Image (cartoon, rainbow, N blue to C red):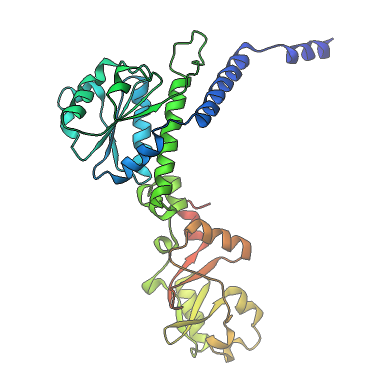
């Protein structure tokens, strides 16, 4: 009997889950519609921003303002200078944050947001290019704009059809599309991304080997002719389990703890060059730390010598350095 009751419970409809699925499907359908009906001015807006000497100033009020802040932050972190101006504060002095070199991106689903009127007037007075995002092409905002990013007609996902849900999702997605298109047009690379994201987990993933490697006096470096008795002292004192062996200023090989074990017999009668692996795995200083860690894992080694384009050793990166920095 209990089993039958349990089976009955699992087949019953959960109103909360039904609502969640309906919302997600409604918004997914709207995103698909946006992809199929991209605003005609989208490419022109990308070109406008690429040519701009100033910043993309984003503004909106309410939910549009929250979405606008995110769009501005995404633009700024991906190579397009941008800042957000609160629409209400603009009328009380913050219009001074907008210059003739800037581009204004104003967001209003209805296109009739009264708080944006002073911003619109300011852009018209000083001939500042203005881009509008709205779902109402005949609205006051869209008529005033130089470029129009019109959202497709799609129902809000809430039960009463009034709460900003689908419209804010579409606006956010359009902002992401704009940022990515600009990234690609600028040739924005992972190295550039790292400049704007130095902190936290993301910063660790985007760090380079050069930022984490041991250099200078910490580098275990010996000449190929160095006796192994002295080489062992150098390896022990630096504590990285590795020694970079050089001839002149070029890397001639690497000695690891594994090499010592493999050549233990009569080890002390040899020189560093005789014991070293002449074909070691090395990495360049500009390699991402995450890539270096993947290489270590694949080759089952704990440390790598970092060399420049001419084969000169610049440092040593150890797996512990990567793990301490949060690289995984």
Report x, y in % for residue 302.
Answer: 56, 65
Q: Is residue 260 above or below residue 31?
A: below
Report x, y in % for residue 230.
Answer: 48, 85
Left or right of 92? Residue 218 is: right
Q: Residue at x 42, y 61 (%)?
A: 212
Q: Residue at x 18, y 29 (%)?
A: 95
Report x, y in % for residue 46.
Answer: 37, 40
Q: Nearer the viewer, residue 77 or 323?
A: 77
Q: Nearer the viewer, residue 155 or 41?
A: 41
Quarter assignment of residue 191: bottom left
Viewport quadrant of the N terminus: top right
- Count of marks placed on residues: 0
Q: Residue at x 53, y 59 (%)?
A: 291
Left or right of 69? Residue 158 is: right
Q: Nearer the viewer, residue 240 or 127?
A: 127
Q: Is residue 308 above or below residue 13?
A: below
- In the current view of this chain or complex, which residue is farthest to the right? 1
Report x, y in % for residue 158.
Answer: 50, 13
Left or right of 284? Residue 274 is: right
Q: Residue at x 51, y 89 (%)?
A: 227
Q: Nearer the viewer, residue 81 or 254?
A: 81
Q: Is residue 219 above or below residue 25?
A: below
Left or right of 73? Residue 124 is: left
């Amino acid at each position: 009997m209990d089993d039958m009751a349990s089976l009955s419970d699992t087949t019953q409809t959960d109103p909360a889950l039904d609502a969640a699925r309906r919302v997600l499907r409604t918004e997914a359908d709207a995103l698909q519609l946006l992809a199929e009906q991209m605003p005609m001015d989208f490419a022109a807006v990308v070109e406008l921003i690429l040519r701009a000497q100033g910043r993309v100033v984003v503004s909106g009020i309410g939910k549009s303002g929250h979405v606008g802040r995110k769009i501005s932050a995404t633009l700024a972190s991906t190579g397009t200078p941008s800042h957000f101006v609160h629409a209400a504060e603009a009328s009380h002095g913050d219009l001074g944050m907008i210059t003739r070199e800037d581009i204004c991106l104003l967001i209003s689903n209805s296109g009739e947001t009264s708080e944006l009127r002073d911003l619109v007037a300011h852009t018209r007075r000083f001939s500042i290019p203005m881009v509008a995002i709205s779902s109402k092409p005949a609205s006051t905002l869209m008529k005033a704009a130089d470029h129009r990013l019109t959202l497709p007609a799609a129902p809000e996902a809430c039960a009463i059809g009034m709460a900003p849900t689908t419209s804010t999702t579409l606006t956010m997605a359009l902002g992401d599309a704009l940022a990515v298109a600009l990234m690609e047009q600028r040739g924005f690379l992972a190295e550039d991304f790292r400049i704007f994201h130095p902190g936290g987990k993301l910063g660790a993933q985007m760090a380079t080997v050069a930022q984490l490697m041991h250099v200078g006096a910490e580098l275990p470096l010996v000449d190929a002719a160095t006796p192994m008795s002295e080489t062992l002292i150098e390896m022990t004192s630096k504590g990285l389990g590795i020694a970079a062996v050089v001839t002149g200023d070029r890397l001639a090989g690497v000695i690891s703890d594994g090499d010592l074990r493999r050549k233990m017999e009569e080890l002390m009668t040899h020189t560093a060059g005789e014991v070293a692996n002449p074909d070691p795995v090395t990495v360049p200083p500009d390699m991402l730390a995450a890539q270096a860690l993947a290489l270590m894992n694949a080759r089952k080694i704990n440390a790598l010598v970092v060399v420049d384009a001419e084969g000169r050793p610049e440092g040593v990166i150890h797996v512990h350095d990567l793990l301490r920095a949060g690289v995984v």
